[in-house]
Image (cartoon, helix red, strand yellow):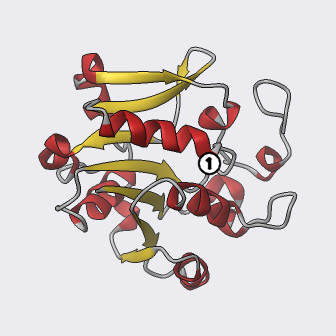
Amino acid sequence: MIVGVLLAAGAGARFGGGKLLAPLEDGIPVGVRAARTLKGAVDRTVAVVRADDAPLLELLGAEGLAVLPFARASEGMGASLAYGVTSSPEADGWVVALADMPFVKPETVEAVRRALEAGAPIAAPSFGGRRGHPVGFQRTFYPDLVRLQGDAGARGLLLRNDEQIVLLECDDPGAVRDVDTVEDLSRPAPDGNR
């Protein structure tokens, strides 16, 4: 069983708040689009959300995700990731996605999942020579993932295990495109497409 972990507990300070509720061009909120893409490729999906973010908790719950309110979200992405993984210790692996990356293609997430099922210790898409998201981890990384803390997420874990990362070349600029500011909603993707 592969579990999707959607990290949706950031404050969105550079955006001015409410980033994951901001509508994309088609009217779908940033966080909902990311949730739908992840949910479509995994067996079960959990979303780690700030405990005081009632609108997002409600929206993602309505999408069928198991929503995990996280009172310690201010401790950073690493703590949120650890919390999300802790909720599913029985999983064979996790596909970790960022809720502020709504432009990732469904086939990119599916490729990460397939790589885990084929035995990749860690799997991630690569676009234009850059490692992107989401990132998949086998269950052997459970002890490392649940100990994460701070705002670096799994960056240190990935650096320490670089030789175990299976990079999946993809034609998906969304794998390296996030939303940090209001301008990012309409900024052209790295290949010139939105």
- Can the viewer see residue 159 in this picture? yes
- Can the viewer see residue 17 in this picture? no
Left/right placement of residue 181 relative to residue 168 reads: right
Residue 141, x across and y down, in percent: 18, 41
Between 191 and 19, which is closer to the camera in this rendering?
A: 191
Can you tell which quarter of the image residue 113 is in? Answer: top left
Residue 92, x across and y down, in percent: 22, 51
The amino acid at mark 1 is: Met
Q: Residue at x 85, y 27 (%)?
A: 192
Can you tell which quarter of the image residue 105 is in? Answer: top right
Between 40 and 11, which is closer to the camera in this rendering?
A: 40
Q: Residue at x 35, y 60 (%)?
A: 80
Quarter of the figure with the N terminus: bottom left
Q: Find disc 1 in the rendering and name its residue.
A: 101
Between 68 and 150, which is closer to the camera in this rendering?
A: 68
Label 1: few (<14), some (14–19) or many (≥20) C-alpha neighbours in 10 Å: many
Q: Residue at x 84, y 67 (%)?
A: 27
Q: Residue at x 33, y 69 (%)?
A: 72
Give the vertical position of 151 relative to 121 (above or below). Answer: below
**Number of numbered discs overlaid on the protein picture:** 1
> For the residue labelled by badge 1, is the local secondary structure a helix, a strand or a loop?
loop
Give the vertical position of 70 relative to 109 (above or below). Answer: below
Give the vertical position of 72 relative to 139 (above or below). Answer: below
Quarter of the figure with the C terminus: top right
Between 58 and 170, which is closer to the camera in this rendering?
A: 170
Residue 65, x across and y down, in percent: 47, 73
Residue 102, x across and y down, in percent: 66, 51
